[in-house]
């Protein structure tokens, strides 16, 4: 009996393919037209793995490693191949745990516990094994099993973190990925085989190693290894603290929540943050020459609440803080630079009247009185009212802005008079040992909640603008992280469980035909790992209140 044929549209082409043809077979025909590897496909707007078969007439759009979902798929698949290679080289009986932690440089920091010595010789063997799998084009296979069977499988393999995780999942099926005999669970789609995973390097670092991978903008080149040591040690400290509380993974957190330990988790985490803020204030107070406290961080880091809480602690130490927003020093609208699309670029340093900013701060340092401007965003001009400032002996200015760590913003001021703080929500919690939670996901969820509450923006709007927000951060904030005197991690180990009920309803409001649906679906699947908790558990001075509301500070 003849197989059915289906009409498949790819760009302007309409071709016929027989039933049973995989998207991989079609992608291989079109690969020559794409400079980067095709790793996924949108089928009538729905993201699919290439190993799936066509089931009817459809429109296809290929996703490469230069695209957002494709790049994430590359890194996720690389994690699977890495873990398999580690077990192949080190042998299962010698390895207790392989943990993929957080981003370092352009890769992931990983550790191994057990009877394995992680040295250069071991790392070279792991790298060689990975290259061997690439040369063999080892397939990455997928099978769907009942959740109960998956839990039993994870228990059998000693993957107790995944066993605990799926005790709380409401889905009936779990996708298991395998390379030869090695089976694992990964959150998201995979490439079809190891031949797609050619670009990586392994570097010894601290107590483990880093797998360095290409950036999305240049997916065929592994960038130089450039660790940011201050950021790394903040992440490591946060992870160690979570481990001490017995919360390494989402499954651990869910156990604590359902076991009635929620109040203690919240109180201890909030106490830790308050101690960190108090320590920063005390350090500033020990340096009487400091007059300008400069705070910068990416979107949804909790900068505003942090500034308020820091100001309280500065007062405890006998100082008088005065808040100043760099946004009030925008250049006049007609002088504001424009981006490549002809729109005003409000995020570049040139959008700030740096000369005026430095002149006024220098005058304040000399004991002069100045009138601080207020920028009118409607008219696009600075206005000078009665906001006059003069610094007393115990006065400090607490200055918040995206460029605060950029030396050019305060180029005329002596470094002795500056204290720089970098703040970000650096997620220390992982889904399980091999599936990390990107810091950007936590910040995006925070922003969806805050935008809906304070700006009337939909989740769709926030998701749509997020890539441009991230581009601004990559350009204006992240390059200057290591300029900071201290770094503060604003992530709370319990916060995603609180954000879950706020975010889910908004994400469900994004239609299947919307471009933002794929990202909404991914976030919903991610939130499904968590047992949700109510906001009544969150203290009114918590950084989380900046996003969910009900805080004690006037923001």
Image (cartoon, rainbow, N blue to C red):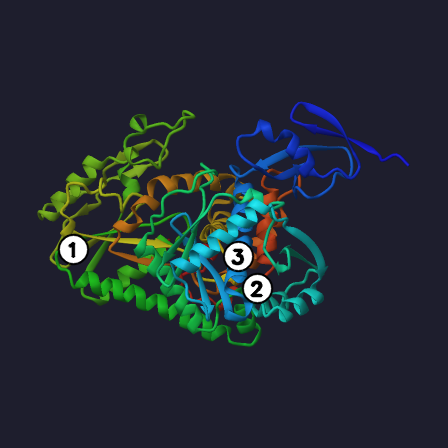
Q: Secondary structure at mark 1?
A: loop
Q: Is residue 314 left or right of residue 176?
A: left
Q: Quadrant of residue 321?
A: bottom left
Few, some or many residues within 10 Å of mark 2 (<14, 14–19, 20+):
some
Residue closer to the observer: 125 or 452 = 125
- Look at 51% across and 65% down and name the residue there: 249
Few, some or many residues within 10 Å of mark 3 (<14, 14–19, 20+):
many
Q: What label sits on residue 85 in the rendered view?
A: 3
Q: Secondary structure at mark 3?
A: helix
Q: Quadrant of residue 233?
A: bottom left
Q: What residue would you read off at disc 2?
A: 532
Residue closer to the observer: 171 or 280 = 171
Residue closer to the observer: 503 or 272 = 272
Q: Position of residue 430 (x, y in %)?
A: 50, 61
Residue closer to the observer: 233 or 302 = 233
- Look at 43% across and 26% down and name the residue there: 341
Mark 3 / mark 2, whichever is N-terminal: 3
Give the answer, above or below, for where 493 lies relative to 45: below
Mark 1 / mark 3, whichever is N-terminal: 3
Q: What label sits on residue 290 in the rendered view?
A: 1
Most extreme residue toward the right, as rendered?
1
- Look at 60% across and 48% down and name the residue there: 190
Q: Secondary structure at mark 2?
A: loop
Q: Is residue 365 left or right of residue 507?
A: left
- Look at 48% across and 65% down and name the residue there: 494
Mark 2 / mark 1, whichever is N-terminal: 1
Q: Position of residue 109 (x, y in %)?
A: 42, 57
Q: Position of residue 234 (x, y in %)?
A: 34, 60
Q: Is residue 295 visible?
A: no
């Amino acid at each position: 009996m003849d197989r059915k044929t289906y009409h498949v549209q790819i760009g302007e082409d309409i071709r016929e393919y027989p039933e049973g043809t995989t998207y991989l077979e079609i992608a291989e025909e079109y690969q020559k037209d794409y400079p980067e590897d095709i790793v996924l496909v949108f089928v009538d707007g729905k993201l699919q793995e290439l190993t799936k078969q066509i089931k009817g007439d459809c429109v296809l759009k290929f996703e490469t490693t230069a695209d957002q979902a494709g790049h994430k798929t590359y890194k996720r698949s690389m994690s699977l191949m890495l873990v398999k290679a580690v077990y192949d080289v080190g042998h299962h009986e010698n390895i207790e745990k392989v943990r993929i932690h957080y981003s370092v440089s352009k890769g992931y920091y990983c550790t191994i516990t057990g009877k394995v010595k992680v040295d250069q010789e071991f790392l070279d063997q792991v790298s060689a094994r990975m290259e061997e799998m690439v040369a063999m084009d080892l397939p990455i296979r997928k099978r769907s099993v009942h959740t109960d069977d998956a839990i039993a499988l994870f228990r059998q393999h000693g993957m107790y973190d995944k066993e605990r995780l799926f005790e709380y999942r409401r889905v009936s099926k779990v996708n298991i990925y395998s390379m030869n005999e090695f089976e694992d669970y990964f959150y998201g789609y995979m490439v079809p085989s190891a031949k797609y995973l050619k670009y990586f390097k392994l570097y010894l670092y601290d107590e483990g190693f880093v797998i360095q991978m290409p950036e999305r903008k240049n997916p065929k080149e592994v960038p130089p290894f450039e660790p940011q040591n201050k950021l790394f040690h903040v992440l490591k400290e946060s992870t160690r603290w979570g481990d001490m509380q017995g919360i390494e993974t989402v499954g651990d957190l869910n156990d604590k929540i359902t076991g009635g330990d929620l109040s203690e988790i919240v109180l201890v985490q909030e106490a830790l943050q308050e101690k960190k803020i108090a320590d920063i204030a005390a350090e500033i107070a020990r340096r009487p020459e400091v007059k300008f406290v400069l705070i910068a961080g990416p979107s949804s880091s909790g900068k505003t609440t942090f500034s308020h809480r820091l100001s309280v602690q500065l007062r405890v130490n006998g100082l008088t803080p005065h808040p100043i927003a760099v946004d009030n020093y925008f250049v006049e609208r007609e002088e504001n630079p424009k981006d490549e699309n002809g729109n005003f670029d409000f995020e570049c340093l040139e959008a700030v009247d740096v000369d005026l900013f430095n002149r006024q701060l220098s005058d304040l340092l000399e004991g002069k009185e100045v009138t601080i401007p207020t920028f009118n965003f409607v008219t696009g001009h600075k206005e000078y009212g009665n906001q006059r400032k003069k610094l007393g002996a115990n006065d400090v200015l607490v200055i918040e802005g995206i460029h605060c760590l950029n030396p050019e913003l305060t180029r005329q001021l002596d470094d002795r008079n500056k204290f720089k703080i970098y703040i970000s929500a650096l997620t220390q919690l992982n889904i399980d040992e091999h599936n990390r939670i990107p810091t950007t996901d936590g910040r995006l969820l925070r922003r969806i909640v805050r935008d809906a509450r304070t700006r009337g923006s939909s989740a769709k709007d926030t998701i749509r603008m997020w890539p441009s927000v991230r581009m601004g951060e990559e350009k204006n904030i992240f390059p200057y992280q290591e300029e900071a005197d201290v770094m503060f991690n604003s992530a709370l180990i319990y916060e995603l469980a609180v954000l879950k009920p706020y975010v889910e309803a908004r994400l469900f409001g994004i239609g299947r035909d919307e471009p933002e649906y794929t990202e909404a679906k991914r976030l919903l699947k991610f939130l499904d790992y968590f047992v949700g908790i109510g906001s009544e558990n969150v203290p009114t001075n918590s950084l989380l209140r900046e996003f969910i509301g009900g805080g004690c500070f006037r923001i």
